[in-house]
Image (cartoon, coloured by chain):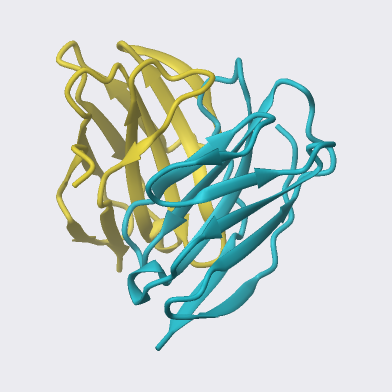
Chain colours: A yellow, B cyan
Amino acid sequence: DSGVTQTPKHLITATGQRVTLRCSPRSGDLSVYWYQQSLDQGLQFLIQYYNGEERAKGNILERFSAQQFPDLHSELNLSSLELGDSALYFCASSVQGGGEEKLFFGSGTQLSVL
Amino acid sequence: DAKTTQPPSMDCAEGRAANLPCNHSTISGNEYVYWYRQIHSQGPQYIIHGLKNNETNEMASLIITEDRKSSTLILPHATLRDTAVYYCIVRQTDSWGKLQFGAGTQVVVTP
């Protein structure tokens, strides 16, 4: 158990809909990362937050947004969903978010867009 | 961050050492070598990392060549539970976020 909690584990929805994925980092970790893993793209970095502020951005679509709340949990919002958004979404956390740090990953949310 | 090259797959017999190579010929002086693994659709798991010196922990050993252009992850006594995709990643010491995963090496440990 990594200590990172993601909910829900599975999500099935239709095209055009909006969903919210939730992540609770390990106790004491200030930085949260979101990754997307699809069969054809592998693990893609989406975005990182540190103590409530956006720190780094990767290949995140404009239809996607994220935020980190004062209690340090994070949410990833996916809107106007398309079939291609079906993927495993992982959240990870680390103490600070820079340099020589280990990332601890949650077990993921499997999103299926039908 | 420097790009890494790994073989797409390798097999290993249970109980034997598994040696996973990684090429990172464009690595710069302030970049660490990290290894993570992912067991079938679970979240990636940190294994080990190093800068210049060889490193060992309870999971594995990391051997970095003197010129730092390549490294080898050693699983000393592979078990069936070590079957996973292993990712070699190079990350700058002052880098925020952006742990870039490549395709990795699919390791299959057989009885």
Please state if B71 lies on the left or on the right of A8 as rendered: right
Question: Residue A101 placed where, x, y %?
Answer: 45, 25
Please state if B97 lies on the left or on the right of A108 as rendered: right
User: Looking at the image, which residue is at 40% across and 51% down?
Assistant: B59
Closer-to-camera residue (B61/A103)? B61
User: Looking at the image, which residue is at 17% across and 55% down?
Assistant: A9
Question: Residue A108 placed where, x, y %?
Answer: 27, 51
Residue A59 can be seen in this image: no
Question: Residue A106 placed where, x, y %?
Answer: 26, 45
Residue A104 versus residue A81 in the image, above or below: above
Q: Residue A52's image quarter?
A: top left
Question: Residue B73 placed where, x, y %?
Answer: 59, 54
Residue B41 versus residue B34 in the image, above or below: below
Residue B64 versus residue B73 in the image, above or below: above
Q: Quadrant of the C terminus of chain A?
A: bottom left
User: Looking at the image, which residue is at 25% across and 31% down?
Assistant: A75
Q: Residue B25's image quarter?
A: top right
Closer-to-camera residue (B45/B12)? B12
